Image (cartoon, rainbow, N blue to C red):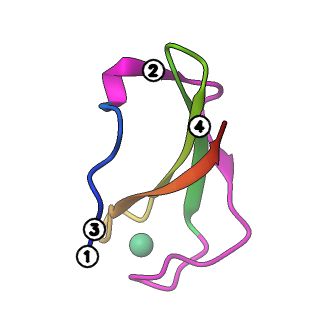
Amino acid sequence: MVEARTYAEHEGTFQDKGKPDDRPCPKCGQMTVVYQIWESSCGGYEDVKYTCTNKACNCVWWVDGIDS
Ligand SMILES: [Zn+2]
């Protein structure tokens, strides 16, 4: 089961343009994953958005960050 995110993406901002992740994409297995820390506008919630930059894959997934 996939839980709905607490906030929509536009309710916060990314802290950076994306950094390469050191794990392969779970879908295509390529080392083409970048991640961005997302912080809610109220500042109390962080998630991490993972994007596979492999054009044949392009999968995106979110991981819950620290929930303060
Ligand atoms: Zn991929």
Decide: few, some or many residues near mark 3? Use Cα within 10 Å; few <14, some 14-19, many ≥20.
few
**Horizontal side of residue 21 vs 56, given as left or right:** right
Task: Please name the residue that numbered disc 3 is placed on.
Answer: 2
Q: Amino acid at mark 4?
A: Glu
Q: Does 18 lie within the magenta span?
A: yes
Q: Which is more N-terminal, label 4 or label 2? A: 2
Q: Residue furthest top?
A: 42
Image coordinates for residue 17, horizontal then vertical, percent: 60, 31
Amino acid type at image mark 1: Met
CA distance for labels 1 and 4: 21 Å
Look at the numbered disc 3 and give the secondary structure of its residue: loop
Rate crowding at label 2 as few (under 14), some (14 to 19) or many (20 or more) other CA atoms within 10 Å.
Answer: some
Cα separation, mark 2 vs mark 1, equals 24 Å
- The circle on residue 1 is 1
Q: Is residue 67 magenta?
A: no
Q: In whole angstroms, how far apart are the C-alphas of marks 3 and 1? A: 4 Å
Residue range corresponding to the magenta coloring: 9-31
**Residue placed at 39% from the left, 60% from the top?**
61
Q: Which residue is mark 4?
A: 46
Q: Kindly indicate whether the residue at mark 1 contacts the one at mark 3 (C-beta within 8 angstroms).
A: yes
For residue 61, above or below residue 8: below
Q: Main secondary structure of the magenta part?
A: loop
Q: Is residue 11 above or below residue 37?
A: above
